[in-house]
Amino acid sequence: MATNHIDFDGTNGQGATFADYAELDITGDIDVRVRVAMDTLDVGGSSHCFLDRASNNVRFELTAGSALKLFWHDGTSLLSRVSTVDPKDIPLTNGVIYWFRGTLDVDNGAAGHDVKFYYAVDADSGSQSWTQVGTTVTTAVATSIRTRTDGGVIGTTNSGANGMAGKLYNVEMLDGIDGTPVLDVDFTDLTVPEVAAKSFDSDANTATITLDSDPATTGWRYSGLTAVTGTAVAGGVLESEIVTGGETIILTTTGDTWVATAGDDNAITDAIIAGIDSAQSEGAGWDAEVKGNMVFGDVARTSDTVITVTLAVEAAYVITANETITVTVPATAYTTAVEVVATPTFDVTNETPSSGGHSRTATIGQVLQTG
């Protein structure tokens, strides 16, 4: 299944752009598909745009109120329809990869047009098993889509609004329902040079996709290209194993090399350590007791493509809930100088009983009563 992806943090105006080309001028039936893992499917009053071609000429999003929404412009008016069921109410799960799909049948043969929405559990492109979300939205008049000479954006709107928060893997637009792909953007197979250049070609019609701005300072990161393995990662690691030390985190990069001074006593190694971060913030947790105590001697550049981090004994490490650890590798550590989020994350499993838990100790009287 997909691992590499663009990780958007909801910043408006940060996404990927593409220029206009003739095949995008679909005036009849259209089929839009995205493969995403939303941070949350309950988006409240915010909208999260997946694709906006030519300023709402065709737009697909998870809209305010948490429904799927498909927009199109018929040359006179901006039209839109929303799913009759919210994905969160199916229920689908936050952070899990799904395909979402919106189709427009501009003439359903009964003097009307139909909009349908679907989801599919994660699968490779072209092998999805679709389930309709809610019911078909039918309007008793045929419609069409105007032609435009604009390109489009992914992850936000053309006007720089509705930035999405989540992981984006694929974006597809088809001419006709189950028709010919005219836009096929695959973020799962980018190379290091493509991410560094912030430019690559779509798998359909070789449209050039440009990643906006600088990933080190704006609202997206590329996740992948460096794999996280090691004894702390395979199957997860226990709280007690962090305490006793000796666990390893191994970072193996693909298509790039580590700079020669990674692991030395310098700012590069400090940044590698700082990027091994917990999603939680317990007072005696990972960030305070593990990351906070790491030194350059714990980080070794064991080859051009491998860095090994060996955890020291951390006797004061105590957590009250599981911790999730993400490794973000700084641009300065790579030869091509591009920051990425390594995959996968890993969990530290809590073993410390909470103060509010039930005691396992029974009194002599209780034992006699049950004997």
Image (cartoon, rainbow, N blue to C red):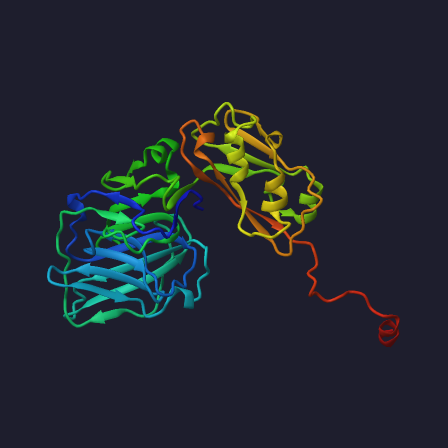
Quarter the C terminus occupies: bottom right
Q: Nearer the viewer, residue 275 or 65?
A: 275
The image position of residue 289, as x and y in percent, is 63, 44
Q: Residue lying at the far left in this picture: please name it.
A: 76
Q: Residue at x 28, y 57 (%)?
A: 60
Quarter of the view holding residue 188:
top left
Q: Position of residue 6 (x, y in %)?
A: 38, 45
Q: How many marks?
A: 0
Judged left or right of residue 29, residue 102 is: right
Q: Please indicate, yes or no, whether residue 202 appears anywhere in the rendered image.
A: no
- Residue 77 falls in image quadrant: bottom left
Examine the rendering and report whether any part of residue 245 can be seen.
Answer: yes
Q: Position of residue 200 (x, y in %)?
A: 30, 36
Residue at the spot 31% in from the left edge and 67% down from the top edge = 83
Q: Is residue 216 above or below residue 359?
A: above
**Residue 22 occupies quadrant:** top left
Q: Is residue 181 above or below residue 105?
A: above
